[in-house]
Image (spheres, helix red, strand yellow):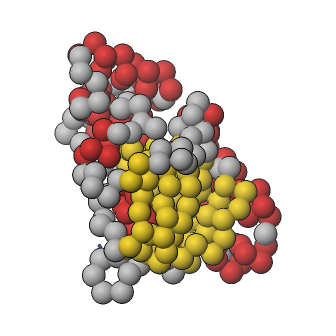
């Protein structure tokens, strides 16, 4: 049995030709895998296939060895898979605290457990602690991204799927987010991080997986990928 998240032979798309072709990758507990590749390579599609938002045409997704084919999206979340899509998904009419409590709602039964889980997130993300009562639309882009991440963490997931958390953020905020992800991984979380900011993602990742036209063209330790100039030029544009 492979612990954590495992995709094997995944083929998926939106109608017409598939976007992903025969994708196999593992994200064991305590591991941060950076999923990189050009615009349109299929990173978002892969996260959607992993979380169950997009049906598979072939292949499978397993969590701790158990096949998820018949497990609905919301039940995958209950089993510990959290998906933070690009665009942040914060409820802008609600406060930071309300957004976090909403994230905790289905994951923790008692009000006291929900409060404790929210307080744990504030301890991890002090910038949110300072903005407890601010409404979503009053937050900066960086604060909203932190809140989206906090809302996923409040359910204490075992697997975190993250789409472009660095998009549009200042370098110091990006560094903060990457540092937080690394620390969560070191505590046992499995993270699959899709990023255009390849340098930032590889700087904290254990492994890097390069997608090109929906296929895995390289899967290696992150430092190897970061230093492979030919591969960077061919697929990553730097
Ligand atoms: P980006 O970084 O630009 O988001 P990506 O690597 O995440 O790129 P995807 O968004 O997964 O790539 O897109 C992969 C391919 O699937 C692209 O050709 C895209 O046009 C197509 N695609 C994405 N979403 C849809 C959709 N809802 N319907 C049809 N085609 C789609």
Left or right for 234, reference 153: right
Q: Residue at x 37, y 63 (%)?
A: 49
Q: Quadrant of ligand 1?
A: bottom left
Q: Residue at x 65, y 60 (%)?
A: 208
Query: How many numbered dots are placed on residues in this image?
Result: 0
Residue 95, relative to residue 170: is it above or below? above
Counting from the top left corner in percent of width and height, residue 151 is at 35, 36
Q: Residue at x 68, y 81 (%)?
A: 234
Visible in this render: residue 82?
yes
Visible in this render: residue 162?
no
Outermost residue, left direction? 93
Left or right for 237, reference 18: right
Specify the quadrant that holds the C terminus. bottom right
Residue 10, relative to residue 171: is it above or below? below
The quadrant in which residue 56 appears is bottom left
Left or right for 38, reference 85: right
Outermost residue, bottom direction? 16
Left or right for 165, reference 232: left
Q: Residue at x 32, y 46 (%)?
A: 76
């Amino acid at each position: 049995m492979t612990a954590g998240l495992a995709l094997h032979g995944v083929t998926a798309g939106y109608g017409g030709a598939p976007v992903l072709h025969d994708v196999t990758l593992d994200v064991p507990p305590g591991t941060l895998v950076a999923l990189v590749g050009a615009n349109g390579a299929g990173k978002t599609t892969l996260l959607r296939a992993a979380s169950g938002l997009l049906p598979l045409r072939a292949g499978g997704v397993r969590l701790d060895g158990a096949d998820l084919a018949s497990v609905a999206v919301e039940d995958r979340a209950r089993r510990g898979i959290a998906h933070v899509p690009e665009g942040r998904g914060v409820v802008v009419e609600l406060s930071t605290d309300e957004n976090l409590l909403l994230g905790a709602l289905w994951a923790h039964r008692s009000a006291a457990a929900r409060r404790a889980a929210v307080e744990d997130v504030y301890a991890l993300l002090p910038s949110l602690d300072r903005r407890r009562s601010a409404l979503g639309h009053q937050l900066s882009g960086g604060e909203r991204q932190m809140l989206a991440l906090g809302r996923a963490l409040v359910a204490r997931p075992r697997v975190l799927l993250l789409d472009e958390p660095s998009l549009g953020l200042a370098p110091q905020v990006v560094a903060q987010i990457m540092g937080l992800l690394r620390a969560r991984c070191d505590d046992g979380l499995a993270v699959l991080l899709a990023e255009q900011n390849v340098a930032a993602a590889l700087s904290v990742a254990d492994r890097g997986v390069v997608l090109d036209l929906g296929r895995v063209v390289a899967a290696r330790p992150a430092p190897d990928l970061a230093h492979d100039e030919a591969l960077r030029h061919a697929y990553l544009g730097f």
